[in-house]
Image (cartoon, rainbow, N blue to C red):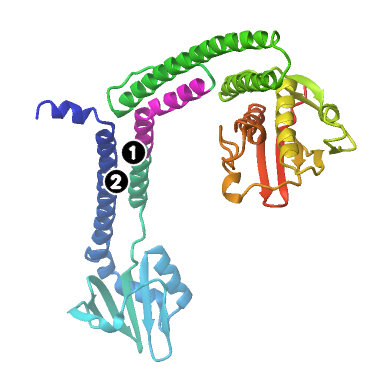
């Protein structure tokens, strides 16, 4: 029990519960006290006996109104003396206060005041009745409205309520301040500052969360460093024997075996290069080597390399070119992978390459007229090592890294790649790159 109490009092959720509970209780107390005070003042005004002044001078009031009654004079008296005056006769049914809720018909006799004056009771209120010249005059104090005191009580209560709200806001914001520090820390780590750590100043749930985030950053930094070292080791250990094998091939006689071995070694070399490039691009912390390039002219130059008798590319360019800031080497790799796929699966039909510009982005579209990709495979072809047809050979199917690399290159430039395909009609690969002019 002793160990549970400190843990409970340091709990963020327990403190928030206390804050909101105290807020509700204080609001209820303020509202209850304010309404009770106003109600007491109201009841005191409504139920207090009529002053002696009214009883002693009731005849003078009626004389001032006159017989027959002067309604204008009656209205002035009602206003000056804070009265509700009601006049009844077979020909008149008038009252000075339209808001009055007095039901004269339910009046109960209390006592005689004079020969023509009586004291009546209507609910908890006292009403004086004077009968003169065929007219009945009923005099009652006007129902009190909110006094200055009542208004002051309302404003004071409202002020306390606003003060409590702002106090709660300040307390909750102070309690949740580590959330902002966690967000800033997560953004810095996301930007690549893996050495950044969030300061831990609390022992509650948010403090524990901060420690967990810092521990996660430690683990992530160690994991990425180990991964980088592994890739460096792989690149060194694999490229060295591949280079030796290529050198040994040069001393072999030209025959079918040499060609087969050369193709296999080149595939291994290409696979290593693709894996290393994919690793560089799979993290947003890798820097692009960007240059200013006239994009349409650059794509036209790349397309020209494929123009021969066996492979035909149809190029469509916009009337006006635009300069862009891109990594030429990686965009060249992107273009080559997409076009090679289109040619490989285009069934000998021409491949259409289109370049167009919107206001803030450029579109590179490559369309083939091949067998197409089944719908269930379209969303997976950008995953690493995924091939829609596992029965294809390496010569026709590749390693499944091409479109994955293309997607990484597009995202590294701040763009995106989309694939649309219909079986038997072909595939359209669209690459959208933001236009960042320097």
Quadrant (top left, top right, bottom left, bottom right) of the N terminus: top left
> Does residue 188 belong to the magenta stretch?
yes
Badge 2 marks a residue whose secondary structure is helix
State the residue lying farthest toward the bottom. 90
| Nearest the eye: 198 or 69 | 198
The segment highlighted magenta reads: 165-190
Which residue is depicted at the point 24% across and 56% down?
40
State the residue lying farthest toward the left. 1
Q: Which residue is mark 2?
A: 27
State whether residue 5 is above or below residue 19.
above
Which residue is depicted at the point 61% across and 32% down?
404
In primary-sequence order, the first of circles 1 and 2 is 2
Q: Is disc 1 surrounded by few (<14), some (14 to 19) or many (20+) residues within 10 Å? A: some
Label ID, residue 164: 1
Label 1 – label 2 distance at C-alpha: 8 Å
| In this picture, residue 128 sits left or right of residue 70 | left
| Nearest the eye: 338 or 170 | 338
Percent position of residue 334, x then y: 70, 29
Quadrant (top left, top right, bottom left, bottom right) of the C terminus: top right
Circles 1 and 2, Cβ within 8 Å, touching? The answer is yes
Identify the image quadrant of residue 218: top left
Magenta segment, principal secondary structure?
helix
> Does residue 137 belong to the magenta stretch?
no
| Nearest the eye: 73 or 212 | 212
């Amino acid at each position: 029990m002793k160990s549970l109490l400190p843990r409970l009092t340091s709990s963020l959720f327990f403190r928030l519960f206390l804050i909101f509970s105290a807020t509700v209780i204080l609001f209820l107390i303020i509202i209850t006290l304010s309404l009770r005070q106003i109600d007491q003042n109201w009841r005191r005004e409504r139920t207090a006996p009529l002053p002696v002044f009214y009883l002693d001078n009731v005849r003078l009031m009626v004389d001032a109104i006159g017989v027959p009654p002067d309604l204008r004079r009656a209205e002035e008296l009602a206003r000056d003396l804070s009265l509700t005056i009601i006049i009844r006769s077979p020909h008149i049914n008038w009252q000075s206060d339209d808001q009055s809720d007095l039901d004269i018909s339910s009046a109960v006799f209390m006592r005689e005041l004079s020969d023509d004056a009586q004291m009546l009771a209507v609910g908890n209120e006292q009403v004086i009745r004077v009968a003169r010249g065929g007219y009945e005059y009923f005099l009652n104090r006007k129902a009190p409205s909110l006094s200055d005191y009542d208004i002051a009580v309302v404003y004071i209560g409202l002020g306390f309520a606003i003060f409590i709200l702002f106090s709660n806001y300040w307390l909750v914001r102070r309690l949740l301040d580590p959330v902002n520090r966690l967000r800033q820390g997560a953004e810095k780590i996301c930007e690549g500052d893996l050495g950044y750590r969030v300061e831990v100043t609390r022992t509650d749930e948010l403090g524990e969360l901060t420690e967990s985030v810092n521990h996660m950053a430690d683990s992530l930094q160690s994991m990425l460093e180990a991964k980088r070292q592994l890739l460096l080791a792989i690149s060194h250990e694999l490229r060295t024997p591949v280079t030796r094998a290529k050198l040994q091939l040069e001393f072999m006689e030209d025959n079918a075996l040499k060609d087969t071995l050369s193709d296999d070694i080149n595939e291994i070399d290409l696979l290593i290069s693709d894996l290393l490039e994919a690793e560089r691009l799979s993290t947003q912390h890798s820097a692009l080597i960007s240059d200013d390039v006239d994009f349409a002219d650059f794509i036209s130059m790349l397309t020209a390399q494929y123009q021969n008798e066996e492979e035909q590319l149809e190029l469509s360019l916009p009337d006006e070119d635009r300069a862009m800031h891109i990594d030429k080497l990686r965009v060249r790799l992107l273009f080559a992978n997409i076009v090679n796929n289109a040619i490989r699966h285009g069934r000998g039909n021409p491949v259409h390459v289109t370049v167009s510009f919107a206001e803030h982005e450029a579109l590179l579209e490559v369309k083939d007229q091949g067998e197409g990709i089944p719908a269930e495979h379209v969303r997976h072809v950008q995953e690493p090592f995924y091939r829609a047809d596992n029965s294809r050979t390496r010569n026709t199917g590749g390693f499944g890294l091409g479109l994955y690399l293309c997607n990484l290159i597009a995202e590294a430039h701040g763009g995106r790649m989309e694939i649309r395909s219909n079986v038997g009609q072909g595939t359209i690969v669209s690459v959208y790159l933001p236009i960042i002019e320097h």
